[in-house]
Each structure stands twice: as C-alpha cells, then as structure tokens.
Amino acid sequence: MISKTLRVIVCTTSFVYTSYVLWQLTYFLSKPIDPAKTDFTRDESPILRALWILLINTSLLSAFMLQHSVMASDFVKNFYYQLNIEDIERSVYNAISSAILHFLICEWQCTPWAYIWNYASEHNHKLWLFTNIAHIVGWGIVYSGCVMMDIADLSGLKQVYYKITGRPRPLSMKSKELQKYYMHMRHPSFIGFLIILWVYPLMSLDRLLLAVLLTLYMALLWTIEQDDYNYHSTMVARKERDLNGGGFSYKY
C-alpha cells in the first residue's frame, strides 16, 4: 500500500517535471533554425547523413507514440486498479511521457541543409511577425485548452487529492458527455499543434517528419463526433460567461 505522503510526492514531482518539459517543448517547436548550420564533414554525403538522421528521429518519435498509446490503454489502467493505486496513474503517465519527450528533445537531430521551403524570416520583418504571432496563438490554444479541460485533472493532482480525502474518482463525478469526449480525443488542442507544427519558416526534412508523423498520430486518434463538438462549444461558452462575471460553474 502506498502511503499518502508518497502519493503526494509522486503527483507533485510529476507535475513539476511535466511543466519543465512542456517549457522545453515550447522552445523546441518554436525556436529558429540556422539554415547554414551543418554537422557533416566534406567526405560525408549530405544525403546519407540526412537519411541517417531521419531514421534516428523516426525511432525517437515511434518510441514516444508507442509509450503514449500503450500507457493510455485500458489494460494498463486496469493494472493500476488491481493494485489500488489508480489515483497515481495519471501522474505516472505524465512523468514517463515527459521523460521520453525530454529524451526526444535532447537527442533530436536537424537537417537544415535539406529543406522543403525556407523563408528567411530574420530578413523579413513581416514574415517574422506573422510566424511569431502564429506560434503565440498556437501555444495559447494548447495551454488554454488544457486549462478548460480541467488542468488539475490532466496533471494528476486532483486524483491524488480526491483519493487521500476519501472522495470518488474525479472522472466518475463528471458528466457522461465529458467522459465520452475524453475517450474520443488524444489532446484537447489539436488545432493549436497543427499551427505550431506547420507554420514554420524553415521546413527542413526533420521538421517535416515531425509535423507529418505527429499530425497523422493525432488525426488517427481523433474521433470527435458532432455531440462532442456541441459539448465543447457549450463548455467554451460557459467559460466565457464565467470569465465575464457571470458566476463560476463547476459542473462538467
């Protein structure tokens, strides 16, 4: 049996580490790339070097997507229930996902010499401004989407708090519409990530690989229906009403 103290340590550590990795991810996906930078010698073929880098990066992405899918499966979740530690499932999931994502960020290799398009935004102030505004909007959608979907629940903090205070699971207290919505999506900010991945001045081959694979991964696991869209629209309107002084509503 895991003690209350250990549960709190697990969820808080996971929250802090996940927040740090998300900050790293923000920089990783939005940082500028120098097209003149190369990391191969004159005796090395740039084509072979690019192919080798794409193979390495594909392996990194595959590991991340595999972990993301396997640990979200019902089989793994039932394992936590059998051990009576279902409250830390989300925290462990976030921590391991963040660790693999952190490894991907650190080991990712670029191919700035091989690209699909290259708009030198540093010499074009309008393009530089457009790209930066697009990424600010994209990240705003990503993080606001997480907040609207109950950030305490997504981070795993609420599950542990409810467990140690003797309350039912947070998800069981939510509406059936929201539970169904959770089952049909992989991430609440699909559009935001699309903007971040594809609105980029230097679409190198490694960046194209990243954009294509992550877009396909999110799209294949995005099974939102009309009822889900209607529910999301209702919740957004309710949040706007709350923020405009209409009183806070906690029923999801």
Image (tube, rainbow, N blue to C red):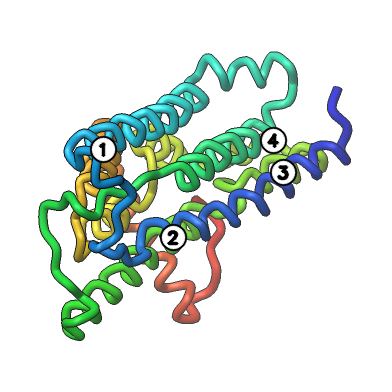
The answer to whether any part of residue 167 appears in the image is yes
- Residue 87: % across, % down: 69, 33
* Residue linked to disc 4: 168
State the image quarter where residue 209 is shown.
Answer: top left
Number of on-image labels: 4
Say if mark 3 contacts mark 4, CB within 8 Å. no
Q: Earlier in the sequence, mark 2 or mark 1?
A: 2
Q: Nearer the viewer, residue 145 or 70?
A: 70
User: Which residue: 24% across, 46% down?
Assistant: 42
Q: Answer left or right for 7 relative to 179.
A: right
Q: CA distance from mark 3 to mark 4?
A: 18 Å
User: Which residue: 84% across, 37% down?
Assistant: 6
Q: Which mark is residue 11?
A: 3
Q: Nearer the viewer, residue 111 or 132?
A: 111
- Residue 252: % across, % down: 49, 50
Q: Which mark is residue 26?
A: 2
**Mark 4 residue type:** Pro
Q: CA distance from mark 3 to mark 1?
A: 41 Å
Other-residue count near label 4 (Cα within 10 Å), few / some / many at <14 / 14–19 / ≥20: few
- Of marks 4 and 2, the one in the foreground: 2
**Mark 1 residue type:** Arg
Helix, strand or loop status at disc 1: helix
User: Which residue: 55% across, 69% down?
Assistant: 248
User: Which residue: 80% across, 43% down?
Assistant: 9
Helix, strand or loop status at disc 3: helix
Q: Earlier in the sequence, mark 3 or mark 4?
A: 3
Q: Answer left or right for 27 relative to 194.
A: right
**Mark 3 residue type:** Cys
